Image: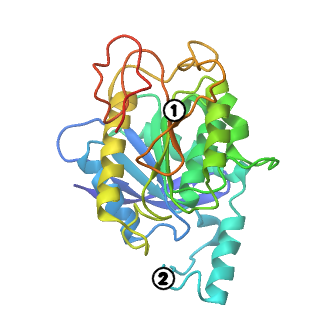
Amino acid sequence: MPRVDVQIPTADGVSNGSLHVPDGAGPWPGVVVFPDAFGLRDTMRDMGDHLASLGYVALVPDVFYRAGDWAPFDPNTAFTDAKERGRLFGLMSGLTNGRVIADADAYADFLLARPEVRGTAVGTTGYCMGGRMSLVAAGGIGDKIAAAASFHAARVAIPDDPNSPHLAAGNIRAAVYVAGSIEDQGFTAEHAELLDNALTSAGVPHTIEFYPGHHGFAVADNAPYDAALAERHWEALRGFYAERLLSARRAITPGRGGTWPRRPGSSGSRRSSRFPGWTSRARTRGGRWPGCSCSGRGPARRSCRR
């Protein structure tokens, strides 16, 4: 599969990126990959290759491009070395919601203008810091994103935080898939319930669940990496994008059609014995989530389990 170094024009300069194109005859849907805090590197390029093998043109941008030619981080020492931790947090703090949205708009436009890419909207996925960016982008650029995924992210639904992504749920025109990690104080069952309620109230089709792994389970050079959970995350993306990017259907407009109605007194979530906390699947009618065993005909079924 071709892997091409590209330059992405943005409002604040140029972001270097890595473009990953499937083999064969396109065009294909496009996906923006928001990296974790360690940024664009070979591990993220490998993940771009994997997405291309699934049939998507993947763009992995350098989200820290405003810092110029920044030195790469060693994931094994970035948080334990005080100097490196300070440098890392300094880069992360520069990614305000406004900058993330402006950059996401540029990344989406870049992909949609490529001859290898088809459609009028892209998918997104992100990891840790990038998972939050994926949701911020979905709430910021509207119908340019049809499917937004987030894995082991933190601070996506924080009470009393005016920058919390859940507050922009009413602006989301994408379907949303969120997979949290266990023992992660940045995304607890309470945070998941807040996010679920916001997305449900906005009529956003979504899945929120917890994988039985720690923060970083999907990224190969992170210490908590879990190969089985990484494969599960790829299968989730495969099904999610197949429904939202490959099919002709698009995410519903919030307020028109909505999600599955709640039972009286229900928060819209459901308890699961398979994962700590709960798993919520708020769906539109017709169709199914990846791994669902129902027919996909008629009303979607909340009882479907992975």
Give the structural element (helix, strand or loop) at label 2.
Answer: loop
Q: Secondary structure at mark 1?
A: strand
- Within 10 Å of disc 1 (Cα), the crowding (few <14, some 14-19, many 20+) is many
**Eyeballing the image, is 182 above or below 254?**
below
In percent of width and height, residue 165 lies at: 68, 44
Q: Which residue is mark 1?
A: 206
Q: Position of residue 191 (x, y in %)?
A: 66, 47
Instruction: Say which residue label 2 marks.
Output: 74
* Image location of residue 130, percent across then percent down: 54, 56
Neighbour tally class for label 2: few under 14, some 14-19, many 20 plus, Cα within 10 Å: few
| Observer-nearest of 176 and 283 | 283
Alpha carbon of mark 2 to alpha carbon of mark 1: how far? 34 Å
| Label 2 or label 1, whichever comes before in sequence order | 2
Q: Residue furthest left?
A: 24
68 left or right, relative to 220: right
Type of amino acid under label 2: Asp
The N terminus sits in image quarter:
bottom left
Total count of labels: 2
Q: Nearer the viewer, residue 119 or 43?
A: 43
In front: 163, or 56?
163
Answer whether labels 2 and 1 touch (C-beta < 8 Å).
Answer: no
Location of residue 63 (image quadrant): bottom right
Please, is residue 237 above or below residue 90 in the view?
above
Residue 210, above or below 204: below
